[in-house]
Amino acid sequence: MTETTKDTTKDRPWLFRTYSGHSTAKASNELYRSNLKKGQTGLSVAFDLPTQTGYDSDHVLARGEVGKVGVPISHLGDMRTLFDQIPLAEMNTSMTINATAPWLLSLYIAVAEEQGADPKVLQGTVQNDLIKEYLSRGTYICPPAPSLKMIADVAEYCYREVPKWNPMNVCSYHLQEAGATPEQELAYALATGIAVLDELRPRVPEEDFPRVVGRISFFVNAGIRFVTEMCKMRAFVDLWDEICATRYGVEDAKFRRFRYGVQVNSLGLTEQQPENNVYRILIEMLAVTLSKKARARAVQLPAWNEALGLPRPWDQQWSLRMQQIMAYETDLLEYGDLFDGNPAVDAKVEALKEGARAELANLDSMGGAVKSIEYMKSRLVESNAARVNRIETNDTIVVGVNRWTEAEPSPLMGEDGGIMTVDPAVEADQVARLNAWRAERDEEAVKTALAALREAAQKGENCMPASIAAAKAGVTTGEWAAQMRAVHGEYRGPTGVSASVSNQTEGLDDLRDAVNAVSDKLGRRLKFVIGKPGLDGHSNGAEQIAFRARDCGMDINYEGIRLTPEEIVTRAQEQDAHVVGLSILSGSHLPLVEEVMTRIRDAGLGHVPVIVGGIIPEEDAKRLLGMGVARVYTPKDFQLNRIMMDVVELADPKDVAAE
C-alpha cells in the first residue's frame, strides 16, 4: 500500500452550504444573512414548488404550496429582496432550479447588475438538469427535446457572458433517492452529462469547447454505505475523465476534472428515533470528504429532523457546525489521499466502473439519455421496490425502524414538535405583493418583452437575452413559463409503473388471496385510484404503493404527478374507485386533502375511503382524520404489506357496511 504522507500545505476546505429558503423572500434573506455570519461560505437556494414548475403564487395549482419547500420568487422584486445586503459579486450561490433555470438565472443576473456587479465576475451554479426531473423529481414543464435545448441555451450564454458560472449541474442526487443502484447512478448521471455536451458542441468554437466542458459540474448523493459511496465518487472521477478525454478530446486535465457538490442522503433519515440521523449525516459526509482524489467542492448537509418537516434555523446550524468541525478541528485536510493503493478500494472502484460502462453502452444503444427516459424510469422503480423489500424483510437493517425500535422520547423535539411550520398567511401575503407588483409595472414594457421572448423561442434562438430583458421589464415567473408552454407544449413523464405484475411477488400469496376474496364480494376487481395532488414531484412513495398494489392483484389507476383535486375526484368517479390514495410530501397536505374530501362528498362519493401518505406531523394527521380521511401514513409506516391489507379491509363491502 502506498504510504500517505502529510502535505506541507493544508488544503482549503470545501464550500459550506445549507440548502435553505422558505416562506417569503424577506424571511429567507434574513436566514441567509444569519447563516453567513455563522460561517457558511456559500448560499444554496431552495425555491418553492410554484417557482420550480413555472407558476405564479396565485395560480390554482399553487394553492397550499407557496413558501412550503422553498422561497417563492415571482418576479425581479422578489429576487431583489432575497439578496438584499448580500453582495452577489462576492458570493458563490447555488440555485437548485431546473425547468425555470433560464428564468431564475436571468433574475439573478438582473439583480447583480442592479447592485453594480459585472456578470463576468459572478460565481455559482444553476442546477438546470431536466433529465433527472423526468426520472425522479418531477418539476419538469416542457418535453425533453426543447428542455435540452434550454439547458444548452444557459450553458452557451454563460460561456460567453458569465464565464465563472457553472451553467449545468448534473444531478444524480434524486436518482439515488428514487432507488438507483451505484452503477445506475453513475451511468444515468454520466449519460445526462453526455447528452448536454453533445447538444452544446456545435454551438461553440472547437478550440473553446474544452473550457465549456470544464464548466459542467455535478450534484451527488452520498448514502449510508459510506465505503461504497466513497468508491462511487472515485469511480465518477475516473469515468468523467475518461469520457472527456476519449469522447470529446479534452487534453487539459483541469477541464476533465470531476467537479461536484453534494447533499448527503435525506431519504435515509428516519422519522423514528430522529436523533440517530445526526450520526447518519456525519457518516455520509465522510464518503465525500475522506478521499482527497474524490473530495466534494461544496457540501450541504440536511438537518436531523428533515423526515419530520421543515428544519428550524438551529437545526441547520447544527449541521453547519458538523462541517466546520470536520474541516477545522480534524487533521483531514493536512494529508494526501488516504485510499490510494488500497486493494479493497481499487477492486470496488473497478467493479463500479465496469457496471457503469455496461449500462452506459446500453443507454447509448438506445440513442442516449433523452431517448432512454422511459427505460431508466422503469429501472429506477424496480430498484426502489427491491430496496423497500429488503427493509421490510429485515435484509437491510435500519436502526430504530426495523430493529431496536424501543427508545426513550427525544428531548430534541421541544414544544414546537421539533420542526418549523410555515404560517398559512404567508400565501395570501405573497399573492398580495404579486398583485401590487403587477399593478405598478409598465404593462406595455411587459407585453413587448413577452412578445420578444415568444419570438425567440419560436425561432429557436437562445432564450437567455430575451429572458433577462423580460426580467428587467417586470415579467413574472408564471408569464415566462407560459410562453415556454405555448411554444414547446407541456409534458407528462412516464410513471415507471407498468400494468404487468413484476417478479417480486414472493411472500404476497396471503395478500393476493385477500384481494381475490374481496374482489369476489365486490363483483369486480378491487379498484385502487392513487393520485398526487398539487405540485409535489416526489413520486417514490406513490410509485411503490402502486407497484405493490398491482403485484397484490389490485386494479390500479396511477397517472403520476401534478394532478388537481378536481382531476383526482373525476378519475375516482370514472374508474368507480373502491379506495382513493393520496400522496403529498411538500407539506401542503391540509389544504389539498381538504379540497379533495369536499369534492368527493360533492360528487356523491362520500362512501369511498380515502387514505393519505406523506411527511405529516401528528397534529396534522389528527386534523386529516377529522376531515374524514380513513388512514394516514408517514415514513414510519414502511411495511407496505400492512398498508395493502388496510386497503383490502377498507374496500371490503362488509366492513364498509359495518362502518
Image (tube, rainbow, N blue to C red):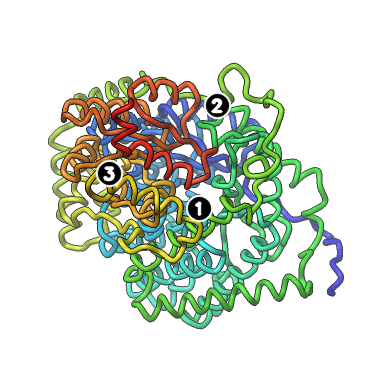
Residue 484 percent across, percent down from the top left: 21, 51
Q: Is residue 503 visible?
A: yes
Determine which quarter of the picture holds residue 583: top left
Which residue is under mark 2?
A: 419
Q: Residues within 10 Å of mark 2 (few under 14, many from 20)?
A: many
Q: Which quadrant is the C terminus positioned in?
A: top left
Mark 2–mark 3 distance (CA, rounded to whole Å): 45 Å
Residue for badge 3: 521
Which circle marks residue 177 in the picture? 1
Query: Would residue 222 be found to the left or right of residue 442 on screen?
Result: right
Q: Amino acid at mark 2?
A: Ile
Label 3 to label 1, Cα distance in Å? 39 Å
At 44% from the left and 21% from the top, the residue drawn is: 622
Judged from this view, the residue extending furthest toward the top is 415
In the rendered image, residue 396, in percent from the top left (x then y), is placed at 63, 54
Q: What x and y, as percent, mark residue 336?
A: 78, 64
- 145 left or right, relative to 650: left
Q: Residue at x 67, y 34 (%)?
A: 275
Residue 415 position, x and y percent, is 59, 16
The amino acid type found where label 3 is placed reads Lys
Of circles 3 and 1, the one toward us is 3
Q: How many marks?
A: 3
Residue at 17% x, 39% y: name it: 573
Q: If you read the primary sequence from the N terminus, does the residue marked by circle 3 or circle 1 appear first?
A: 1
Q: Secondary structure at mark 1?
A: helix
Q: Secondary structure at mark 3?
A: helix
> Which residue is depicted at the point 35% across and 28% down?
629
In which quadrant of the rendered image does the N terminus lie? bottom right
Is the residue 23 above or below the residue 503 in the image? above
Residue 50 can be seen, yes or no? no
